[in-house]
Image: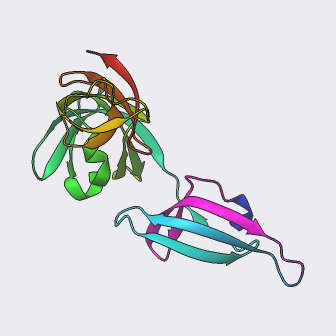
Amino acid sequence: MPTTNDFRRGMVIDMAGVLCQIVEFQHVNPGKGAAFVRSRLKEILSGKVLDRTWRAGEKVTEVRVEHRIWELLYMTDLEFVVMNPDTYDQIHLDFDLVGDASKYLIENSAVKIAFVDDKPIMLEPPDTVELEVVKTDPGLRGDTASGGSKPAVLQTGLTVQVPLFIQEKDVIKIDTRNDSYLERVSS
């Protein structure tokens, strides 16, 4: 059974029946007293972030998570329908299970789904996505001394800051970890 000494980012543990993912952790060895581990955990189903301090070497229950690539077929207001590209099996995912990842998803794109005992627990968007700009103001000429940026609304409804040269109908690459513009893919 793993202990707090085996912590790593992304590890999923069971805390009294609640699945939590380790976001960050730090081993602390004070000059006086016993060593301990500070951790920040995210409840998978609710998205709530918890801070927890553990004794060094305390046993935890690790949950085996299996990641599979599925294809997003379509979305409704209440659910997402995904298909296994190998077996053509389809499952319906509640909007609550998808959560914030919905702002990066478009139909017919590949998504990574985490399963515990063949039950989907979360959907993870890819690190980068390519989305079309549907609304943005035109950049003003001569307004680039500060390396300016402007807001742009993407096809999924996500708003990001983009350089002034980006126009409507441009396809841009977005980093999903921090909602930042990476590059223009096509115009």
Q: Percent from the top left, x then y, of residue 112? A: 38, 38
Q: Image quarter for residue 170? A: top left
Say left or right for 131 vs 29. left
**Viewer-proximal residue, 105 or 74?**
105
Q: Percent from the top left, x then y, of residue 146? A: 44, 35
Q: Percent from the top left, x then y, of residue 87? A: 28, 28
Which residue appears at 28% of the width and 51% of the height?
98
Query: Which region of the structure is painted magenta?
Result: 7-31
Which residue appears at 88% of the width and 83% of the height?
32
Was residue 172 drawn as part of the magenta stretch in this picture?
A: no
Vertical relation: 61 (above or below) 124: below
Q: Image quarter for residue 35? A: bottom right
Which residue appears at 40% of the width and 40% of the height?
176
Examine the rendering and report whether any part of residue 101 can be seen.
yes
Was residue 20 drawn as part of the magenta stretch in this picture?
A: yes
Vertical relation: 172 (above or below) 2: above
Q: Percent from the top left, x then y, of residue 84? A: 29, 32
Q: Image quarter for residue 142? A: top left
How many circles with numbers are drawn on the protein?
Answer: 0
Q: Residue furthest top?
A: 186
**Viewer-proximal residue, 152 or 116?**
152
